[in-house]
């Protein structure tokens, strides 16, 4: 399967955050998340494993009880059900990979 970003719709999540579902199938999903300066990815958890690669920008990320500044080229791993969230310090884009897929991100049938 080939997925071209220009063909994937961007979803405005509000408050300076938007999301583009790139590809999914089987047990994997990849999602691009865009943040404006100062936008917040509120603390939350979910039963999925998640990798986050910082494509651009700078973020203050909290995973569990640890908080660090991450920048372009850094990667984060979030185990299932761990609380996590971020504040965008410099506008940027994250590339999230989930397993299994985030059914809650897909259109309702």
Image (cartoon, rainbow, N blue to C red):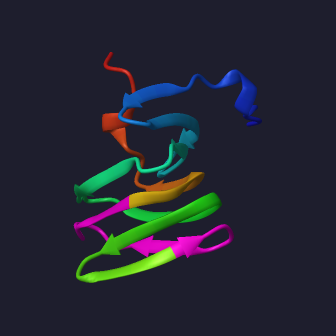
Q: How many marks?
A: 0
Which residue is drawn at the image coordinates 23% and 82% (left, top)?
Answer: 65
The percent coordinates of residue 42 (x first, y second) are 27, 53
Left or right: 52, with 44 as reference point: right
Name the foreground residue: 24 vs 14: 14
Closer-to-camera residue (23/96): 96
Q: Is residue 29 left or right of residue 106?
A: right
Q: Residue 46: where, in percent of width, then height?
A: 25, 57
- In the picture, measured across the screen, residue 3 lies left or right of residue 77, that is right
Task: Say above or below: 25 vs 70.
Answer: above
Image quadrant occupied by the N terminus: top right
**Start and end of the magenta stretch?**
70-86
In the image, what residue occupies the spot 45% across and 74% down? Answer: 77
Residue at image point 51% right, 43% down: 36
Q: 25 or 30, which lies in front?
A: 30
Q: Is 22 drawn above or below residue 41 in the view shown?
A: above
Q: Which quadrant of the figure has residue 108?
A: top left
The residue lying at 22 percent from left, 66 percent from top is 81
47 within the magenta span: no
Residue at the far top in the pictured view: 109
Work out whether 83 lies above or below 64: above
Q: Is residue 14 above or below residue 26?
A: above
Q: Which x, y percent locates residue 3?
A: 72, 34
Quadrant position of residue 82: bottom left
Residue 74 belongs to the span the image colors magenta: yes
| The C terminus sits in image quarter | top left
Q: Quadrant of residue 50?
A: bottom left
């Amino acid at each position: 399967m080939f997925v071209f970003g220009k063909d994937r719709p961007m979803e405005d999540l509000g408050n300076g955050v938007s999301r583009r579902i790139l590809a999914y199938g089987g047990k994997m999903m990849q999602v691009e998340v865009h943040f404006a300066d100062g936008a917040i990815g509120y603390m939350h958890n979910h039963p999925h494993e998640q990798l986050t690669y910082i494509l651009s920008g700078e973020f203050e990320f909290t995973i569990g009880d640890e908080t660090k500044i991450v920048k372009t080229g850094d990667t984060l791993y979030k185990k299932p059900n761990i609380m996590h969230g971020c504040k965008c310090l410099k506008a940027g884009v994250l590339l999230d990979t989930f397993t299994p897929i985030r059914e809650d991100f897909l259109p309702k049938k």
